Image: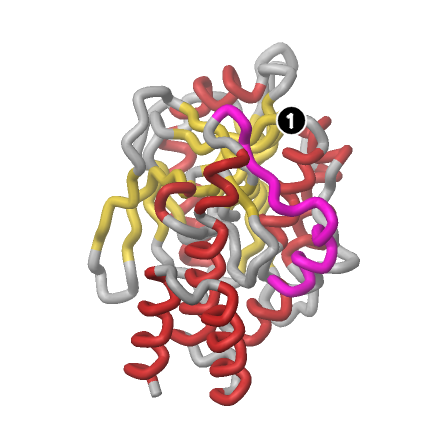
Amino acid sequence: MRDPKKPLISIIVCSIRPDEAEALRVNVAQTIGVEHELIIHDNRGSDKGICLVYNECAAKAQGEYLCFAHEDISFLTNDWGGEIISKLSEPSCGVIGFAGSVVKYAYRYGWQGVRRFTRKNYLSKSSSKRESLRKTDCVEPYSEVICLDGMCLFVRKDVWVKFSFDQRQFEGFHSYDTDFTTSVAYGGYHNYVCHSILIEHRSVGSFSKSWYESVMLYNAKWADKLPLYAKSETNRKQVERYAAATEAFGLKLLLKFGILPQREMWQEIKSFWQRNKFSLSSYLLIIRYLSHK
């Protein structure tokens, strides 16, 4: 029976692979080091988007601390629960994750952008079993960001109540994380990437037409507020300086995954060239387009 005096972390998973969900259950039990509950929603054969699932599960969670986790992660650090609770207990703390960006522009990309503005700390494992450590060198255990990747998100329940996932606009499985964490940061809280706890993520993400549509939806929702940036990590001059490079990064994604028709893609690149004629990003983008074509 649970001791009500002890803090509780509620771990919420939207699952389509029961074997991975079970592996996560075992991993959490072995590594968390504090009281916890695991709420696994079997979403196979359902038309529920991840925002709806997360909100429904969070509403019935008993813990004052929530963890929204993908089932294809594992915690590689022991006794991580106490450290997460300690950080989340800070009144100004918003969301804690393991990959994010200190700047969010109104360009067509997800949370990630140019390397200078990204903060990461996780082990990436692809389907081919290749591993790579995605790590930003950081002296402090936490670095402030604006938005976070949704592989694993910690937040106090009272903060989630204020900024619950936007299930009305984001009905699928993309950009919900960028939107939720942006909402929390814009609402006055501080989001962080954790550098002292390591997790493994067995996915490299997916970039599709539905992903692109969700990005455009996010941009429309936040159009009059972007760019946003973590003021403790960067400044307005840096934001302006790297704007063109970040826009080019987004165009490269569209090009790489063939999301736009070729003619439309060329028009976008030509427009970028006309606005940034003498930048290195313009030349690299033209070369990338020609090589893809």
Above-or-below relation of 26 to 159: below
Question: What is the crowding at mark 1: few (fewer than 14 residues within 10 Å), some, or many (at least 20)?
Answer: some
Question: Could you tell whether 118 is left or right of 161 in the image?
Answer: left
The residue under the point 41% across, 33% down is 29
Q: Foreground: 119 or 94? A: 119
Q: Position of residue 56 (x, y in %)?
A: 73, 47
**In the displayed image of the protein, which residue is found farthest to the top?**
5
Q: Mark 1 points at which residue?
A: 189
Q: What's the residue type where badge 1 is placed?
A: Tyr
- The part of the chain drawn in magenta is 215-232
**What kind of element bears circle 1?**
loop
Residue 77, picture quadrant: top left
Is-magenta flag for residue 227?
yes
**In the displayed image of the protein, which residue is found farthest to the left?**
130
Q: Foreground: 225 or 258? A: 225
Q: Is residue 254 in view from this perspective?
A: yes
| Image quarter (top left, top right, bottom left or bottom right) of the N terminus | top right
Residue 228, picture quadrant: top right
The residue under the point 42% across, 25% down is 142
| Image quarter (top left, top right, bottom left or bottom right) of the C terminus | bottom left
